[in-house]
Amino acid sequence: MTMLRMLRLGASSLALICLLGQVNSVGAQPCSARQCPGIGLAYPGGVNDNFAPPEDPASPRPAFLTFAINAGAGITDFDGNDIDEWFLHSFTGLPNTICSATLTIRLKPLGSSNNDGIAFQFDENTNTFGWSEVIQTVAGVNWAAPQPAVDLTFDLGCLPPDGFGRTSVLAQVNATGHLDIRVQDDTSVDFISLEICYDCPTPTKSTTWGGIKARHITSE
Ligand SMILES: [Ca+2]
Ligand SMILES: [Ca+2]
Ligand SMILES: [Ca+2]
């Protein structure tokens, strides 16, 4: 579950303070962000309105959307109420030094949704996902209406092993700077919240004469 507690500060990609030392170590690896305290971000997706109309727009990356269209899928948004449609959303412009990421998503089955799935991180080079699982498996309930909505929280660096034994998508997220989510195909998505902690970029020392001189003067 969540590796680091975070304190919200406000804004649309919300600044956070990672409160270090508050680590829940259940199944999680130590987070190297503790070397770089104080940097975190939260990215909201959709509106936390308990599936209230109107539908709120989802924003899949173009390549992700093209994949779904080519697969012949109907596409839905946040709070969609139709069956047999895919929900797609992407968080883009992410830092490439993320060491901890927690995703919270509220889902509701729209019918007999027992075979519905959730998948993270689409790769347009292979048309595959970095992790996927049946919602009923991760939710631990009979995934069929009128089962009420559930909030699921995923540690993206310490996921439950999927059918391929995969447990993390952080490397792919850092390599690409984005995170994709697919939910299909008879399940409604109320909102998604992504919270990350990331390491400071390593400062590079200037090798110009001016830079060398400046460091020398500073150290005197
Ligand atoms: Ca809404
Ligand atoms: Ca289904
Ligand atoms: Ca909503």
Image (spheres, rainbow, N blue to C red):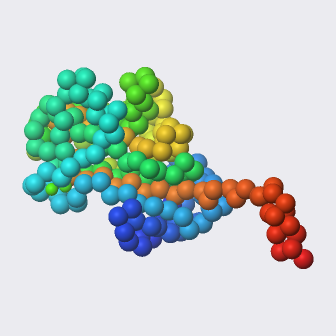
Q: Could you tell me which quadrant the C terminus lies in? A: bottom right
Taking the image as shown, residue 47 lies to the left or right of residue 8, namely left
The answer, for residue 143, to whether it is visible in the render is no
Taking the image as shown, residue 90 lies to the left or right of residue 204, namely left
Task: Give residue 147's position: percent from left, percent from top.
Answer: 15, 45
Q: Residue furthest bottom?
A: 220
Question: Total marks drawn?
Answer: 0
Give the residue displayed 63% in from the left and 63% down from the top.
36
Give the residue displayed 37% in from the left and 57% down from the top.
43
Taking the image as shown, residue 92 lies to the left or right of residue 183, namely right
Task: Give residue 206's position: percent from left, percent from top.
Answer: 77, 58
- Compared to residue 160, the image places residue 8 above or below, namely below
Give the residue displayed 56% in from the left and 68% down from the top.
38
**Closer to the camera, 144 or 43?**
43
**Closer to the camera, 55 or 113?**
55
The image quarter in which residue 112 lies: top left
- Compared to residue 119, the image places residue 209 above or below, namely below
The answer, for residue 176, to whether it is visible in the render is yes
The image quarter in which residue 84 lies: top left
Task: Give residue 113's position: percent from left, percent from top.
Answer: 17, 34
- Compared to residue 20, the image places residue 177 above or below, namely above
- Compared to residue 22, the image places residue 96 above or below, namely above
Give the residue displayed 45% in from the left and 41% down from the top.
159
Task: Give residue 201's position: percent from left, percent from top.
Answer: 63, 56
